[in-house]
Amino acid sequence: MPTISGSGETKNEHQLNKGVWTDNGPPAQAPFNVIGKRVPLKDAYRKVTGEGVYADDMKFPGMLHSRILRATQPHARILRIDTSKAEALPGVRAVVTGADAANRFGVLPVSQDELSMAREKVIYNGEPVAAVAADTEEIAEQAIWLIEVEYEPLEAFLKPRDSLKDVAPELQLHDKVEKKHPNTNIHKAVDQEFGDVEGSFKGAECIVNAEFKFDGISHGFTEPHAIVAHWDADDRLQLYTPQQVPHYTHRALAKVLELPMHRIQVIRTMVGGGFGGKSDPFQHEMIASLLSMRTRRPVKLTMDREETFLTGRGRHPTEGKLAMAFDAQGKLLALDSDIIIDGGAYGSFGVVSAYYNGVLSNGPYAIPAFRYHGKRVYSNRIPSGAMRGHGSVNPRYCTETLIDMAAVKLGLDPCDIRLRNFMPSNTLTPYHKFRITSNGIREGLAEAMRRSDWKSKWGKLPYGHGIGVGCAWYISGSALPIHWNKLPQSTVHLKIDMDGGVTVHSLAADIGQGSDTMLAQCVAEVIGCSLERVHVKSATTDTAPIDLGSYSSRVTFMAGNAARKAAEEIRAKLASAASKLTGQPAQYFDLVNEEVICRTKPDVRVTFMEALHEAQADVGALVASGSYQSPPLGTQFKGSNAGLSPSYSFSAFICELKVDPETGFVQPIKIWAAHDCGRALNPLSVEGQIEGSVHMGLGQALTEQLRYRGGQLLNGNFLDYKIPTPFDTPEIEVIIVESADPEGPFGAKECGEGALAPIIPAVGNAIYDAVGVRMFEVPMTPDRVLKAIEAKKRAEAKGE
Amino acid sequence: MSKRLLKFVVNGRQAEVAVEPHHTLASVLRNELNLTGTKVGCDMGTCGCCTVHIDGKAKLSCLTLALECQGAQVRTIEGLNEYEMHPLQRAFAECGGSQCGYCTPGFIMKSCELLEQNPDPSRQEIKEALAGNLCRCTGFMKIYDAVEQAAGELRKKNTQQPAPAKV
Amino acid sequence: MAKIHAGDCDFLSGGTDLLPNYKCGLNAHGHVISLQHIAELKQIGRDSKGAFTIGAGVTLAEIERNTEVPRGLADCAAHVASPLLRASGTLGGNLMLDNRCHFFNQSYFWRRSLGYCLKADGDRCHVVPQINEGGKSVLNNKVCVATHSSDLAPMLIALGAEATFVGPDGKRTIKLNDFYWGDGIARFDRKPGEILSHVTLPPWAFNVRSGWKKLAPRQSIDFSVVGVAAVLELDGDKVKTLRVALGAVDTTPVLFDFSQQEKRREPGHYLFVDAYKNMPEAVGKKLDDALIETIAKHVQTQAQPKLNVPMAPDYRKKMCGVLTRRLLTELRGGGK
Ligand SMILES: Cc1cc2nc3c(=O)[nH]c(=O)nc-3n(C[C@H](O)[C@H](O)[C@H](O)COP(=O)(O)OP(=O)(O)OC[C@H]3O[C@@H](n4cnc5c(N)ncnc54)[C@H](O)[C@@H]3O)c2cc1C
Ligand code: SF4
């Protein structure tokens, strides 16, 4: 039975069993020591004082500054590049172009389609074409505009549907496209059909369908891209970069620069927000490295805000046609979806996105029959990629809107119809065999309904005032790694020397979500020490064992488990040391609060340090390694790996808002956000993740969109790209649901991404409750809402 | 253009730097004085990351020319952490008001100005004061918590100080 | 100094408009003269003759907090940009704010990709690419339609403010409404080297009800995409004075003076909006819902916003009517 807590009520009442790791004797009954406590982030004090070092804060002796020349055409052949004038400018130290790096790279092994800089042609307005390193940033900026580039424009593909057409080879953006459509600009097509879709629709009591459209959006992290590359005196490359996934950058650098990986060290700086936007290996990382190798000097590259937007990898612009079938009781019979997503210029994570847009619709409701046709296309626009809630967010809006429409048609309460269809816990989905472990969505929705007083509000509020619901689920780490090999997905090393400090080595990237803190908590809990003892080193590839980094909500589940395992090794050593000192059997010892205590004779105890020094006799520092690898999951059809995860999170949100029927403005009033994260290792962080997800989701719901003029991004700045301000953000009440996943560390699953998707349909459905219009275009900007209201009025006037 | 000498007081210390007339205060603080706690998120006045105090007022250092600060008193995030950590800094850490941390110095500097003018702000007043700062991580809730907590602490501290003797 | 550099100089006040534009390389001048340390520009209050003046260097934050200025003006100042920008931004900078256009307020890289435009470095307009010349549609290489985006300008115009300038040729005072003039490039008739010293509010501005409504995508930080300022004086329930001014719908603020005290300077004072066309006579009439509706409809019909700032022009046009109606209804009830 999941337990409920959260920002609205009890804080930190986790009197739950520990004993997850005792394999001898009865499980300890003590409460957790550090798990479940509201602890500040490990690096918070560095952040609040300004001491934390981000890449742009770095300075090195002799450091050069660089700027990138970007394509001023969306699609064009490069006829000529002349860098001589730039090279002649005093203060310029090096100029590089596409000719200096021929190897392609990309985050997915199947989509190695990015060049460090364009070579024969440019494929989006903003693509890097050349770069300069100079004594100052101003000289570098001056120099890039002295580089002459002659273009021959080609037909540009700016609407996703244009990319479906057969075209001449020179109009294909990449050599490798979807095999089924070899003459197009389709990057990936996915077609899946399971169960009797046709039959289900034929026999259905209620069918709902609609066409949806979503604008592209951007991560909008506050730190613009910045890096420093240093080809040092030992002929090694040191790359300082705010990467979510240092390991993939490491691999890509080795490929592009044709160096063995060990001659490169990737050093993660503090990351000023990522949200998926700092998880690809990037062109600028290659460029700064090339410039540094050329000059043997440290080279800093700091982008401005517009360039950060142009580097892209945000949520795909999406068009979808979806239908759902229900029986008379509101039981879901089938889902049929047809979705095109605009990938922009590169592959990026796009193959995964193409699958996720379909397969992640197989929850949180049981879907007996399922069909999905998905296409991801290339276009001459900013590359799309992975963004918080990757692949699940837009289709989630569609299905949640359709369910609401079905509820209206069938005369059901929208929450009730959802409750009728939630998948149970401990089950497998019928076709993809997604393994659902713990599932607290029922409890979550019930609690959100109770706190929001749903039953007395829904359908009963005055015109212009409404309440709506949205539910979602999300993976807790992709079960299959991107690179096929036998390595574990996460490894964590521990070292404790005589000073008593516990050093945790991991490559899981703390990007502000608090993964360092999570690792420290997991370790401290197992070895019974205070959190202050634990120091996490998660920045450098030289010292950290590989972890696949911070994406797909995998870190707590996977790195947390690896840390727990490593700590258990240490725990065993400390327990036998205590046993040696006291003569009691090792398995009787609990490690709690800096003491090693004999469970059967509580007076028999030694301090953490006594046990430690005993354990170190003759061996010195204690070291241990733990790793995590997903269990075998899933089934056997092409593409069946996509969407597999060792565990899934669930969420149920309710939003109350007001719509101004004359202006179309939507003012959210309050949001109740229930999220099942298995176990809140640090409720402060869990709430922070959920509140942040809600804020970001509200942006997509109401104000954020990437707008273009032809191939040019119109709003690559924080004035015109509308991140909600404090005034646009209502009160958010977080409801933490703890369902205790059997495999997650201490029962934890993800909470940083899944909580974004449900807010958007909750807003859309609340708008319907307020003014009776369905929004099929996102963001639901005032002009769109007003248009819908007026259309409804016209239709009513006509007596429709 | 030739450099000019800028003399001003930064975090209580006299500073003299030669600056280009077109350089902003943000770039001089970061690049010349190595006070990199002040962040630049948009360089256009929209995100508030670069907020510092100029003569006691919270202003955007990315839209202030360095030379405009001739003779001025400038305070940055580093200046709040002298001898002891400012209650706002502590509260932002403890309440989860900082996640990625990039906007944090700006939020703290603006909040600091608020608490100097209004030791007991309501949540709405906090919102109004922070309406020019953008945070992408926290959804603002924990930032408001932090300002409230720090306000309480500062009030306690101030009442504990002996009242000035009446004349 | 201004005299020396006349022609190639800009003034810097709060810098919140000038610096973003300079960073984008927009029409940067060789010299920038700072007005920040001129004490005379920073005064707000009654002068020796009892006239209420606001110095050009007074910040928006100061206007917002001032308790003597008409309500509408304080309210208007309080909704400009964000608290941080209002701490620096000044009245002078606000009134001289450069017009905005999403093809203009862009980086050098961006504008180069587009091929520049009339307002900076280019030879054509991308918002109105063709104009009618002698019955023929030809390339628009003449008129820029960039949107006037200052919030205080329409409010002060509704309040009948006058602006006093000091320049190489001495001092002059001009009705603020007459000052704004021309297309998105010309914008106003400021003589080279001239600085705005202060604005003066007429005595009647303190006897009327005034108000401001702003439409922007977000509730902070953003520029107006429609701004409506109104000034109302009632005689019982009858209209005595009624002035409505719009921001962000033309290349200048647009005044609708329903009491017709102020004559337009000449036809073509506003580029797109003919504020006077068939203007409903309001003075002496009872300000009932019907009259408010007529006035709102008139304002809405005349407004011709262009697609160069956020939000669609037809939507913004409609909002001119909605906001005018709401504001007048509020003012009739005594204001906020
Ligand atoms: C993110 C953002 C949002 C904004 N939102 C709004 C908004 O909602 N509403 C709004 O109205 N404005 C807005 N602004 C624009 C600007 O901040 C304000 O208009 C502000 O009042 C400008 O004043 P300033 O003193 O900073 O101007 P400055 O940048 O110093 O000057 C602007 C122009 O006026 C000239 N100038 C200044 N003073 C004088 C003088 N005394 N005599 C002659 N010329 C002078 C300058 O030479 C310059 O050309 C916004 C700006 C930003 C960056
Ligand atoms: S309206 Fe003016 S600024 Fe905009 S494109 Fe036309 S000429 Fe340029």
Image (spheres, rainbow, N blue to C red):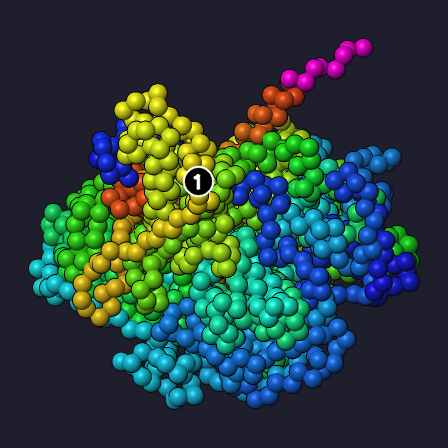
Where residue A234 appears, x then y in whole percent? 61, 68
Viewer-proximal residue among A317 and A279: A279
Task: Examine the image and state in which quarter residue A159 appears.
Answer: bottom left
Q: Quadrant of the N terminus of chain C?
A: bottom right
Q: Residue at x 40, y 41 (%)?
A: A523
- Which quarter of the figure is the C terminus of chain C placed in? top right
Residue occupying image coordinates x 42% and y 85%:
A171
B162 in magenta: yes
| Residue A39 in picture, x, y percent from top left | 46, 35
Task: Return the residue nearer the eye: C219 or A800.
Answer: C219
Q: Amino acid at mark 1?
A: Ala
Whether residue A745 is situated above or below residue A630 in the rendered picture: above
Q: Which secondary structure type mostly characterizes the magenta part of the structure?
A: loop
Secondary structure under the numbered disc 1 in the rendered image: loop
* Residue furthest to the top: B167
How many residues crowd mark 1 within 10 Å: few (<14), some (14–19), many (20+)? few
Please say whether residue A429 is visible from this viewpoint: yes
- Asked whether C242 or A616 is in front, the reply is A616
- Residue A748: in magenta span: no
Q: Going 28% across and 39% down the picture, which residue do you hit?
A: A21
Q: Residue A723 at x, y = what percent?
A: 50, 52
Number of numbered markers:
1
Q: Quadrant of residue B14?
A: top right
Residue A727 shows up from this direction = no
Q: Which residue is mark 1?
A: A617
Chain letter behind tag 1: A
Q: Which residues are magenta?
A: B160-167
Please give left or right for residue C101 compared with residue A33 in the image.
right
- The residue sitting at 27% across, 37% down in the picture is A22
Q: Nearer the viewer, residue A406 or A532?
A: A532
Q: Position of residue A145 (x, y in %)?
A: 67, 76
